Every structure is written in structure tokens, then in C-alpha cells.
Image (cartoon, grey):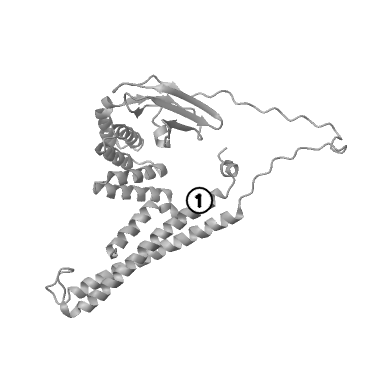
Amino acid sequence: MPDAKDAGVVFGAIAAIAPGAFAQTDPRETAQAYFEAGRRYLEQGDCAAALPRFVQSLRLEEGVGAHLSYATCATKLGDVVGAWNHYRGAERIARTKGDEQRARFSAKAASDLEPSVVRLRIALPPNEDLRVTLDGRTLEKYEQTLLPTGLAVSANETHSVIAEAGTDTWRRDDLRGAPGTELPSLSVTFGPSVVPAPPTPTAPGAERDGATREAPPSKPALDPAMHGTGIILAGAGAASMLAGGVFGLLAQGSLSGAKDACTAGGGFAYPQSCNPTRRDDVLDANSRASTQATIASIALIGGVALVAAGAVLFFTSQPRHARTEGRR
């Protein structure tokens, strides 16, 4: 059964992995929270848990520290390709910020790994909606920015690249190279857009004579039931997470009370030895701390689940073209 300290850890972890549950969170603050969570895992030697946090941080805001931390973990895990790409990403951001020291460090680290990777260069058209897929995996935006100058891929393996923008598709297969080499440069170009033919004009008076005019397509309406349920679930989840945090703090207070009662009178060390005259107080405080910690954990985990379910219902209640219309 978790104690108060466990509850505090659970609260901190959930706040780090699900900051998007709070609608008014600043993306930069959220990126920093993901980065700090990843650093804690890195310092504990758990790179497998750290890497997803660094990726989430970089999706919200690119930072030199997040790139370097990812590269450090990737190197430890033997992912030379990932390490090279993130060292190059760190170098690019450092130079834009005028941080020459870290830029030189990142460039040197990437140079040391370069004999083990193949470099792929692709010139991309200026299109915000461009999506590039490498070997079936959609590249992150910060990875796409490396393509014009060189993105590392595995050596002695066959790769395929697909670029999509709207209905246009560009594809290249059978890309393969030896370690330390660079593949021939490529350039993404799409065919000319097809302009729809203008509508056939209707003769004057045709509508009055009974000819029908095609009505413009109507926009699919959002599903109000799903939309409302999503908002309710997300609100309930946020409230549950807040309650979990309160119980976590209460559990910490109870545990502190148990320690104070145990060590009263001096010469005692919690939990190895306690003042026998305060035994009932210690047991009572420990029991409260354990119960509060359990409630905190359940409330936090349940809150995250409710927020996630609410988000799914909220976004799926909107028609697809209505969700993307603003970008087009």
C-alpha cells in the first residue's frame, strides 16, 4: 500500500505526463515540465522512460537541453541515428540562440558519430501541411527541419520516404547507403494542382421554369451529445486530479505527524525505533497517511483517464473537414 511519499511522487509524475489536461497551461511551461520529468528519469538511469518526455517537450518547443538530453539517452541505448539527429538539432537551435559553446559541443558529438550513419538530404517545399514519412514513421517537425541539411538514417538498410501535402504525394524507395556516406540529394516536387472547371451557367428563367439548382454541400454538424459529454468528463477528470493532489498533501502531513510522534522525547529514529508512549499516535498517523495516499493515487489515475476520455469525445465529436478547415 503506498505511503504519503509515494502519493507525492505519483502526483508529480502525473502532473508531468499529463499537463495538457489543464486547458490554460502555457505550452512553454508544459514543454519545460516534460523536459524536467525526462531529466529526472535520465538521472535515475531510466532512459526508456525519459525519451518520450523529451519528445513531448520538443513537440511543444524545441530546446537545446531537450535535444542534448535525448542524444545522451539515445547514445546509452545504442541508437546512433537518433543521437546524431538530436545533436544536430541541438546545434541548430544553439546557433540560433547565439550559444556557441553548446553549438560547438553538439557539432563535435555529431561528428564523432558520423562514420556510423548515412546522411539523407531532401529539399522540401514551403508548406506548413507537409507530412514526411520515413520507413512508415511520420517524422516530427523538428526532424523535418534537418532534411534539407541532412538527416541520419541507418546504414546498410533500405529506406523509403513519402511526402504528402493535401492530395499530392511524392515517394522514393530503395534508398540505401554504406556507413559514413551521404545519399544523392533529393527534392520534393508535386505535380500541378488541378483547377476545377467552373460550373455551367444556368439559363435565365430556368429556375422559374422548374429546373432545380444544386444546393451547396452543407457542413456536417458536430455531435452535441458527444461534445457535451467530453467537456463533462474532462472537467470531472480535472477535479479528480485536484482532489488527488489535496489528498497527497494530507498524506504528507499525516506522515510528518507520525514521524514527530515517533521521535518525541529524543533518542528515537523513525521508523526503526519509536517512543513507546506514543505508539498509538504513531500507528494512527501512519494509518491515515496510508489511506490518504491510496485515495490520492486512485483519484489522480482516475482523473487522467477521465480527462483522456473527455478529450477523445470532444475532438471526435467535430466533423473532420470542420476541424481542418482553418489550416486549409
Outermost residue toward the bottom? 277
* Image quadrant occupied by the N terminus: bottom left
In the depicted structure, whether residue 321 falls above or below residue 200: below
Name the outermost residue toward the left: 267
Identify the image quadrant of residue 59. Answer: top left
- Residue 49 visible in the current orientation: yes
Position of residue 303 measured from the top left corner of the image (x, y, whole percent): 43, 59
Q: Residue furthest top?
A: 184
Residue drawn at (74%, 40%) of the image: 215
Residue drawn where x is 58% and y is 23% of the image:
192
Above or below, 12 relative to 247: above
- Determine whether, in the image, residue 264 is placed left or right of residue 99: left
Tell me the quadrant of the picture where the C terminus can be found.
top right
187 sits left or right of 255 in the view: right
Mark 1 is surrounded, within 10 Å at the Cα level, by few (under 14), some (14 to 19) or many (20 or more) other residues, namely: some
Q: Residue at x 40, y 48 (%)?
A: 28
In which quarter of the view is residue 176 placed? Answer: top left
- Figure quadrant of residue 160: top left
Q: Secondary structure at mark 1?
A: helix
Numbered disc total: 1
Residue nearest the viewer, comparing 174 with 44: 174
List the residue tagged with mark 1: 312
**Amino acid type for the residue under numbered disc 1:** Val
Q: Give coordinates of residue 111: x percent, y percent.
A: 26, 28
Q: Is residue 22 visible?
A: no
Q: Is residue 315 left or right of residue 265?
A: right
**Residue 233, image x, y percentages:** 50, 59
Residue 250 point in image, percent of width and height: 33, 69
> In screen coordinates, is 258 left or right of 32?
left
